[in-house]
Amino acid sequence: MSTFDLEKLIAQKFEEEEFQDCYLVEVKGPNGGKLEVFIESDSEMTFRKCQRMSRFLEGHIDEAKWLGEKYTLEVSSPGVGNPLKLKRQYVKNIGRKMEVKTVDGEKYEGILMTVEDDVISIEGKVRKKVGKKKVTEEVTTTIQFDNIKTAKVKVSFK
């Protein structure tokens, strides 16, 4: 089985009404008999959607004997702690607190305000030295997509 074959199968499932706002984020494996499929949704990614996708893929994998007799298939959403990979994921997270690390080694933390064709903007607090005092200012930073090394949603339990 190739990743291309698997992606075609997933795209086929995405044509169903329940899955039309879903998209593939990543496929990992099969490594050591383990295949991981990460899917996301523009609205809500539910356990039921992951379960239905898993059963759909499992049926095809078993029928074609792509992974042999023993394998593990995991279908899930990437989860909050994982880095965002697709622009579509950024759009879904507008208004949430983010941590962005750039290719140049800069680190920004703040609220994701906008997502455009090739940039995002984050609004956050920055401490600056003014004379002998330190002041906190709200600053909006624009970051090019091609300059983002990692971007993660920050979970707050306040």
Image: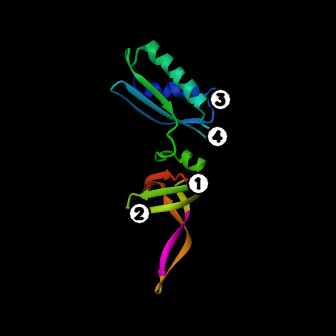
Residue 57 seen by the camera: yes
User: What numbered label is drawn on residue 72?
Assistant: none
Gap in angstroms between the C-alphas marked 1 and 3 = 26 Å
- First along the sequence among labels 1 and 3: 3
Residue depicted at 60% across the width and 47% down the height: 92
Residue type at the position of mark 3: Glu
- First along the sequence among labels 4 and 3: 3
Residue placed furthest toward the top: 63
User: What numbered label is drawn on residue 43?
Assistant: 4
| Residue count near mark 2 (Cα–Cα under 10 Å), binned few <14, some 14–19, many ≥20 | few
In magenta segment, residue 128: yes
Gap in angstroms between the C-alphas marked 4 and 2 = 31 Å
Residue placed furthest toward the front: 158
Name the foreground residue: 109 vs 121.
Answer: 109
Residue type at the position of mark 4: Ser
Residue type at the position of mark 1: Arg
Q: Position of residue 88 (x, y in %)?
A: 56, 45
**SS type, badge 3:** helix
* In this rendering, the label closer to the viewer, 1 or 3: 1
User: What numbered label is drawn on residue 106?
Assistant: 2
Gap in angstroms between the C-alphas marked 2 and 1 = 20 Å
Residue at label 3?
18
137 relative to 54, above or below? below
**SS type, badge 1:** loop
Q: Looking at the figure, which quarter contains the C terminus?
A: bottom right
Q: Which residues are magenta?
A: 123-129
Gap in angstroms between the C-alphas marked 2 and 3 = 40 Å
**SS type, badge 4:** loop
- First along the sequence among labels 2 and 1: 1
86 relative to 142, above or below? above
